[in-house]
Structure formats: C-alpha cells, structure tokens
Image: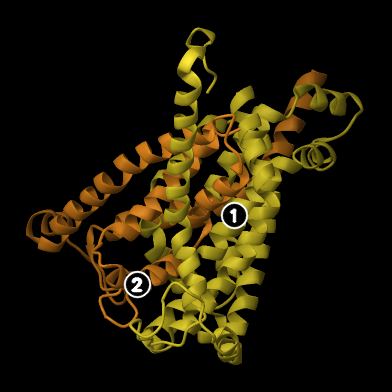
Amino acid sequence: MQSTGRRKKAQMDVFVLLAPVVIVFVAFTIVPFLISLIISFFKYTGYGKMEFVGLNNYIITLTGDANFTRSTIATLLIFLVSVVPQNLIALVLALILNNRFIKLKGLFRAVFFMPYITSGISLAIVFMGIFSVKEIYGIANYMGSLFGLEPINWFANADTMYIVIGLILN
Amino acid sequence: MSVPVSQIHGSKLNHLIFQIGCYAVLFLFLLFFGFPFYMMAVLASHTAPVDWSQSNPFLFGAHFIDNALALFHDLIFVRAILNSIVIAVLTTLVQIIFCTIAGYLFAKCEFKFKKLLFALIVGSLMIPVFLKIVPLYQMMVFLRWTNTYLPFVVPAIATPFGIFLMKQLIETSLPNALLEAGKMDGLNPYQIIFSIVFPVQKASIAVLATISFIMTWNDYLYAFIMLPNRESFTIPIVIQSMFNTLGGSSYGQLMIANVVTHLPILLVFLFASKQIIRNILAGSIKG
C-alpha cells in the first residue's frame, strides 16, 4: 500500500517536471504541424475566408506545377552530388587523421570542423565573392575556373565530416 | 599504421611514402577548407570594387581598419550584435535547463506514455521546419511576440534535438548507483535533478550548450520571419540586408561583418571542442 502511494507520488513529480516541456512541445510543434496539414486542404491566402478544396492543392502541385518537379529534381541532384562523394572524402580523411604518426592533429581537426560551425549566410556571401561572375572581385575567375554547385558541396561536406570524424577520431 | 614485422625489410621506404602521402592529402584539404576563411579575412581588408589586375587578391590590403570603423558606425549592426548575443544566450540557458530535465526523465524514469512521447519528439526531428513556420508565425503575431525575444526563448523549452541528445548522453554516462545513493539519502526528485544530475552531467551540458549556441547564433530563416523590425535584427539578417543594399560596393564591410560573426562561435568552439569530442567518444564507447 505504502509503495503504491510512493509510486503515485513519483509519477506526479515526473509529470510536474515534464509538464512545461510537453505543453510547449504540443503548442509550438504539434499544433503548427497540424494547422499546416489542415490548411493544405483549403484555398487560403493567409487572411480572409478559407475555402475547402479537398485534395485539389495536392493535385495541382504534383501534376501541373513545373517548378515543383524541377526543384525536386534539383534537390535530388544536389543530394547525389554532395552526399555520396563527401561521405567518401570524410571517411578517408578520418582514417588518415586516425593514424598514430600524424602530427598537428588539433590544427587539422579544427580547420576541418570550421565549415560546420559557420553560418550559411556568411559562407554564401564569401562564396559569392569568390565565385562572383563579375570580373572585378571574382577570385575564381582570377584563378580561371568555373563552379556552381560547389558552395552546397561545402555545406554537405561539413555535416558529413562532422559525423564521421567525430566518430572515428581519438 | 603499424608495420608487420615480416615486412620490415624495405618497408621503411614504403612507410615513409605512405606517411608523406597522408600528409599531402591532409594539407590539400586543409587548403580546401581553410581557403574561404582566409579569403574572408583578405577581402575584409580591401575596398571594393578592386581591380585584381592591379593588386594581388591573395594578399591583405590596407583598408581593414577603415572598413571596420565604417561598419561599427552603423548602429543597426551594433544593435544586431547585442540582439544576437541576448537571443543566443537566453535560448541556450533555457535549453540547458529544460532539455537536461527532460533528458534525465526520459533516460532514467518510468512513467506513462513515455515511449509514445519520446517517439513523437524524435519523430518531429525528421520534419523540416518549413512545414510549421507559417502557422507558427500566425501564432506569434496573434500573441504579439514578433520583434521580441519570446519566439526564440519559449519554444526552446521543448527542443526535440536537445532532449534527444541529453537522453542519450545521460543514459550512457550517468551511473544508476549515484541516483540510488541519492534516493537512499532521502532526496526528492527535484533535489536529485539539481544536486546530482546537473553537477555530474557538466560535460554533456557543455556539448548541448555549444551546439545550441551555434545553431541559434547562425539561425537565419526563423529569425528573419520572427523579427521584421530593423531594430530587432540579428547578425545573419543584418549581413543579408547589407548585402542587398550595398551589394558589391563595399565588400570589405560585409566581410568584416562576417569576421565579427565568426568570432564568438570560434571562441565557443575552441573553448569546448575538446570536451565535445571527449564526450561524444565517451558516449559511443560505453554505449
């Protein structure tokens, strides 16, 4: 009898401690997702009246929207171009860095991690500077080269690098 | 790479070649990764537009201080630094407290709906933020929370990633014996959390704090949507708007802004990187 009472008390404590997390999680994650889902069945401009149109939005997007198909293909391409080779590179670098005889491990590790901790905006602007088409400040032009997918490559690089190196390094 | 004893004849040369090859690959990628950051610093010291046929783009120019002064003359930028610091610090603190508590409860306590709740939280990690951002914005407008710190601090109470991370770390690195000892000494659950879990999990908390600080500091889309006023901009938004208005005409200032953006992150990273790596490994080996 006493033990069930104690267990109930422990349950209460857990719920009190977890309550703010659950409330906020439901209010700011679950509810917006559901509202998004509901809106997807309506014709809605962000204000004014909502008009129920059923699956119409989905049909239009999946069949009639050229942008949608094009951007889906682009996403897949970027995924292939970035994830596959960068995983291989990250694995090779991690294996090399894992060797006993390598000196300056800290330096290499820090520089390899750096893209991961920088913001997308900064990187994008630096790359726009480097790969600018305008002749005046495009460093890449100066070096006589091309690029287009490269910035994205770098981002993906950073993420995969982080995981693999983090796992294998000692 | 250890060399087998049977190959010791003639293998010293091979070993040397192998070592040199390894270093070559490493230095190649060092250049590859370091180059953008080096260029960032270099471009910060030039006035744009520069005619590269006149000056060498890989060397530092003479205008670093001019550019910096011009940048800090802009009060919006100074204000943005303060905004970014306040938002990042507050968010990180809130995340540390609530994610540690929730992580501990999920890792070490039994209660109803635990599996379902945890599955929901981890599952929400898979769904991109774009799916919820429109209703979230409408909610924030309705609550009159736009242009304040609240849209960052309040949702940070339940950060799925932080809860997941803390649950994994606490599960592997907090000995049950400590908790049992605490219970034997008559501590209630609140005392256990604040006098055992928090002090023992300092390393895990450092990991969470680093990651959450970096994520908040770099966050662009969410901040851009929730903070439409110029006075409440954070650094990434200011850089973006500077880029739109100045364009190529003052690349130097833009790059200085970038350098300034990176400084706190680098500090946090250098300060905690050893602890992060150690802790990731501690978790992976024991788990």
Q: Which residue is mark 2?
A: A139
Q: Amino acid at mark 1?
A: Ser
Q: How is the image coloured?
A: by chain
Residue B257 point in image, percent of width and height: 53, 77
Side (left or right) of B165 relative to B240: right
Chain containing mark 1: B
Chain containing mark 2: A
Residue A23 point in image, percent of width and height: 58, 51
Q: Residue at x 62, y 60 (%)?
A: B266
- Relative to A114, is B228 above or below? below
- Relative to A96, is A29 above or below? below
Q: Residues within 10 Å of mark 1 (few under 14, many from 20)?
A: many
Q: Which residue is mark 1?
A: B212
- Say what secondary structure mark 2 lies in: helix
Viewer-nearest residue: B129 or B273: B273
Q: Residues within 10 Å of mark 2 (few under 14, many from 20)?
A: many
Q: Residue at x 66, y 57 (%)?
A: B268
Residue B276 point in image, percent of width and height: 64, 43
Residue B100 point in image, percent of width and height: 68, 43
Looking at the rendering, in which quadrant would you find the C terminus of chain A?
top right
Q: Which chain is orange?
A: A
Residue projecting furthest to the top: B6
Residue projecting furthest to the left: A64
Q: Residue at x 81, y 41 (%)?
A: B199
Q: Residue at x 47, y 19 (%)?
A: B11
Q: Which chain is yellow?
A: B
Q: Are marks 1 and 2 in contact (CB under 8 Å)?
A: no
Viewer-nearest residue: B127 or B69: B69
